[in-house]
Amino acid sequence: MRITKTQQPDCLQKCCCEDHFGALVSQTSRVVRRAMDARISADVTPELTGVRGMLLGEIVRANKENRDVYQRDVERWMQLRRSSVTALLQGMEQDGFITRCSVERDARLKRLSATPKGVAYHERIRLSIDNFERELQRGIPSEQQAVARSVLERILNNARDLAGETRAFPEGSADGRG
């Protein structure tokens, strides 16, 4: 009889996360992402995931503020590689949430804009994510949330150093503002 991961003894399932902090962070990230995707799918539309919903929100916000948004902005915001962002944007465009329009000054650049469909879903997405965040942080005092945020930002910066990447948050600053 073949044993699946869910049938394995607890000691086999837990050991990696108990021994390795990075494994716990990675597993937490995956579970949070799946839970958010399920929430967005149930509350808003199965065409969207949590990442797509958050990105659509950023694009709608930028459009309302008359700021141009390009693929390289999305790469920076989401810390994703160009190929991943390309696939993400292509899917959102095919599903009718955004358009990509050429820019006169540089035909290689594509300005991202929310479609009427994308704008229509924006408020529902925002409410769903806000509710998800509240539930995710339920029972955690604000002081502990602040400590957790600080620790996670330090871990993120340490991981970026190890990967040879630039830091999003300068040393001593939780939000990059000094």
Image: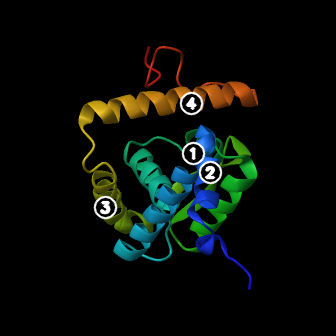
Q: Is residue 159 left or right of residue 135?
A: right
Tag 3: amino acid: Glu
Q: Quadrant of the N terminus?
A: bottom right
Instruction: Give the amino acid at mark 2.
Output: Cys
Local secondary structure at mark 1 = helix
Distance between the alpha carbons at the discs numbered 3 and 1: 39 Å
Q: Amino acid at mark 4?
A: Ile
Q: Which residue is mark 1?
A: 18
> Split into 4 quadrants, where in the image is the C terminus?
top left
Asked if residue 82 lies left or right of residue 39, the reply is right
Mark 3 in CB contact with mark 2 (< 8 angstroms): no
Q: Which label sits in the foreground, 1 or 4? A: 1
Of badges 2 and 4, the one in the foreground is 2
Q: Secondary structure at mark 4?
A: helix
For marks 3 and 2, give the CA distance.
Answer: 41 Å
Q: Quadrant of residue 132?
A: bottom left
Query: Which of the two discs, 3 and 1, labels the residue nearer the N terminus?
Result: 1
Q: CA distance from mark 2 to mark 4?
A: 21 Å
Check contact, mark 4 vs mark 3: CB within 8 A.
no
Mark 2 highlights which residue? 15
Disc nearer the start of the sequence (4/3): 3
Which residue corresponds to mark 3? 123
| Residue occupying image coordinates x 53% and y 63% | 98
Mark 1 touching mark 2, by CB under 8 A? yes
Of residue 168 and residue 17, the one placed in the foreground of this image is: 17
- Residue identified by numbered label 4: 155
Q: Which residue occupies 42% across, 43% down?
A: 66
Q: Position of residue 117 (x, y in %)?
A: 42, 71
Callout 3 touching callout 1 (CB < 8 Å): no
Q: CA distance from mark 1 to mark 4?
A: 17 Å
Residue 7 image offset from top left, x and y in percent: 60, 75
Residue 135 x/y as whole percent: 29, 56
